[in-house]
Image (cartoon, rainbow, N blue to C red):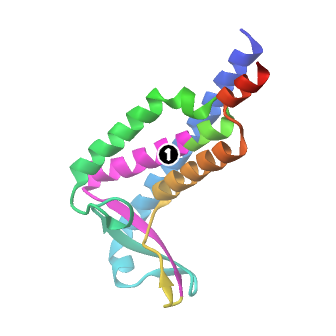
Amino acid sequence: MTRETILRQNTYVILTITSITIIAADQITKWLVVGKTSSLLTSPYVVIPGFADFVSVRNTGAAWGMFSGNGIFLFIIALIVFILLILFFKSITEGYFERALGIFMVFSGIIGNSLDRLFRGSVVDFIDLHIHNFYHWPAFNIADSSICIGVIIIIISSLLRKSQLQLDKTKK
């Protein structure tokens, strides 16, 4: 077995463990929120006064409640995105670890929210960020965060690292 093969296998093990950890954290926190729903519905649990609370919100739509009530449609879109990421994994990552990490984070978020849609009928959101009463961000969860962070990692890597195609052209 070559060194490159071992590194590649170790990378996939690390990415898989990371993905499983994100999905588990997402589902465990949602399970805790659902268990505390009655108290969180009446009043939020203040984490940082004037900035962060835990709440219990059910989202039947996508990000920020878009396409509300279209759970099956959103599940199909998530499945299509998941399949496309798998099909184009190599060309998107171009061998860069951080891009693979970004894609695995997006996978994790898709799986976490899809599990909610399948088994709860809606996505459980519970992180509520705000600046006192001045500004209020829509509630979100760990899966949403994983998707956003994964996309940001891919974008930053794509901006900062040259494409393998560009590198190949400069070598010629």
> Which residue is found at the position 71% from the left and 23% from the top?
168
The boundaries of the magenta stretch are 103-131
**69 w.r.t. 158: above or below:** below
Q: Amino acid at mark 1?
A: Val
Tell me if residue 122 is in the magenta stretch: yes
Q: Residue 16: x and y, percent? A: 56, 34
> Which residue is found at the position 34% from the left and 84% from the top?
42
Q: Residue 1: x and y, percent? A: 71, 8
Secondary element type, mark 1: helix
Residue reaching furthest top?
Answer: 1
> Which residue is found at the position 56% from the left and 87% from the top?
50
Q: Residue 81: x and y, percent? A: 39, 40
* Circle 1 Cα neighbour tier, 10 Å, few/some/many (<14 / 14–19 / ≥20): many
**58 w.r.t. 6: above or below:** below
Task: Tell me the quarter of the image containing the C terminus.
Answer: top right
- Taking depth in this image into account, of 138 and 47 the one nearest to the observer is 138
* Quadrant housing residue 35: bottom left
Question: Which residue position holds label 1?
Answer: 106
Q: Could you tell whether 52 is left or right of 72 in the image?
A: right
What is the count of numbered marks? 1
Q: Main secondary structure of the magenta part?
A: helix
> Which residue is found at the position 52% from the left and 81% from the top?
130
